[in-house]
Structure formats: C-alpha cells, structure tokens
Amino acid sequence: MHKMRISSRRLFLQLTINKKNNNFKKLIGGVMKTKKSYMFFVILLFIISVTMNAQIKRKIEQVAGKDVKTKIWQGREIQFVGREIAVKIIPSATQTEINKLLKTVGGKIINSFDKLGWGLIELPADKDEILAVDDLLRLPFVFTAEPNMVTSVFLEPNDPYFQGTSPATYPYQWALKNTGQTPPTGTNDADIDAPEAWNISTGSSDVIVAILDSGIPMLNGLLSHPDLDDPNKIILGPDYINDGNGVRDELGHGTHVAGIAAAESNNGTGILGVAWNCKIMV
C-alpha cells in the first residue's frame, strides 16, 4: 500500500488555469506574500473527466451510420448494432430451413451465409434483438446466434512503469489500470479507468496545469528529466521560494507531482502522465 506524507508546513491547493488567465501570477503572488514559511501548491488536475467519475465507459453511438444499442445479455452489458443478428447455421442447413429462420424473426439477409455458416440478419424495427436471438437458438439448424456486437480498443501507452516492462519489474502505476498484478497484490479494476478515459481525451495543449511545488529537474538551466524535458510543453514560472535556484527541484516532490499530472508519455521511457498532452507551468 502506498502512503503519502503531507507536511503540516505545506499547503496543498488544487487549481486549474487557462493559459489566457493573466491573473494567475497576481493570485499566487498575493498568497505567497502572506506566508514566510515554505508553501507548495500542488495541482493534481490530471484526469480531465476521470476524477469526476472513476467509472468512465466509452459508449459507441453509431457504426457505419447505424445506431448502436446497449443492453444486458447473458449477464453482462454489451453494445451492438441495432436490428442486426449474427447467425451461424449448421453445415447441413437447407434453403427451406433458412427461409424458416427468416420467418421466425421477420428478418432479411444482409450478409449471405458464408462457408463457415455465418450470416447477418436484419430485423424489423419493432423486433427486440435479445428476444430474436432466443427465438433463433430454439431452431435445431441454428448452431449459434448473437447480437452483432461492437467494442473498442483502449489506448495503451508504452511507458515501462505503466506497462511493467524493463526496467520496471511490474506495473508501478496500478492506480491507472489495476489488473490485480503481483506484486503488489492488487484488486482487479480498483483504479481510475484511465485507458477508458484516454480513448476520449489525453489532454490538450490549450490546457495548462499549474504546479507550484518544489520545482522540476534542471541542469545548467535546462530541463533535464527525460519525461519532463520538452520546452514546448513546460512553462517555467517565477521562483516564489527565492532560494536562488529558480524552479530547479531540490526535494523531488514537484517532479513527482508534475510527472503524475502530465509527464511526456507513450515515449517508451519512465512513467505515464494522466493528461500528457496538457502543458505544465512550474
């Protein structure tokens, strides 16, 4: 189990700003003037819509101009093309039996039965697809029948500490996608459903995530972390600590938070940022 220790000297504030908001510096500057001790503001706006709903499910609305429906079938939720049934008949099925099949559900053939026995049937508008499947399965010459189901492939970035590939020894970022991996002993799907959300959005360069924390890795005045080194993505702000080191991270916490929020991702290196196409201001 991972734990986060929060110092009582630090104030964590979640803020989201638009890059056109020129009042941001004034706001932060005013707050900082009221505190002499170290104060770090951490932005954890990583989730676009994920933090609002940890169970985002991508719904497909149409396929080839046809409406897609969602229903419960065989104890699980499925999506399928409305009014369409995929049917497999036995090899010995005759044309007379095929005609009986069509009459049973009031349907018509839209994809002829192939050499494997599969065909696609279109139903009348008033015919329930699930009930039609049940009717067809009662026919002795129907091997199987099912709604013409559709699905989608979720985006799976290749960052090793997300995928659990070398040099990582397991998927460290199990909070994004938990498959019950060991170690640690996890609970399947106890996560924020990040891959489902990435199918909708991976962030936008029009969104700036402002992270006022301990800074970001710098070396000789340049960004130096392989997941946080894109000058087109990372905006360097003022040094509110006034320690003479600019926004260079000397504690590591700011690097950690910036990476979680929007590290450069799907680049085969390091970790995965949740909203990796967003910009970062540090």
Image (tube, rainbow, N blue to C red):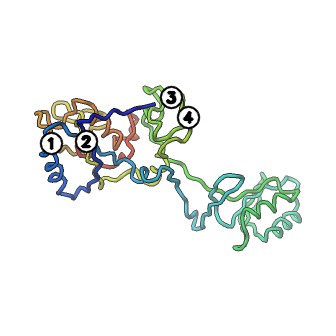
- Amino acid at circle 3: Pro
Q: Secondary structure at mark 3?
A: loop
Residue designated by label 2: 11
Residue designated by label 4: 180
Pair 3/1: label in front: 1
Pair 2/3: label in front: 2
Q: Secondary structure at mark 1?
A: loop
Taking depth in this image into account, of 98 and 233 the one nearest to the observer is 233
Labels 2 & 1 near each other (Cβ < 8 A): yes
| Residue 267 locus on image (x, y percent) | 38, 38
Q: Secondary structure at mark 4?
A: loop
Relative to 232, 149 lies left or right: right
- Amino acid at circle 1: Lys
- Amino acid at circle 2: Leu
Q: Which of disc 4 and disc 1 is earlier in sequence?
A: 1
Labels 3 & 1 near each other (Cβ < 8 A): no
Q: Is residue 274 above or below residue 160?
A: below
Residue designated by label 3: 184
Residue at 46% across / 39% down in the picture?
Answer: 175
Q: CA distance from mark 4 to mark 2?
A: 34 Å
Q: Secondary structure at mark 2?
A: loop
Pair 1/4: label in front: 1
Q: Which of disc 1 and disc 2 is earlier in sequence?
A: 2
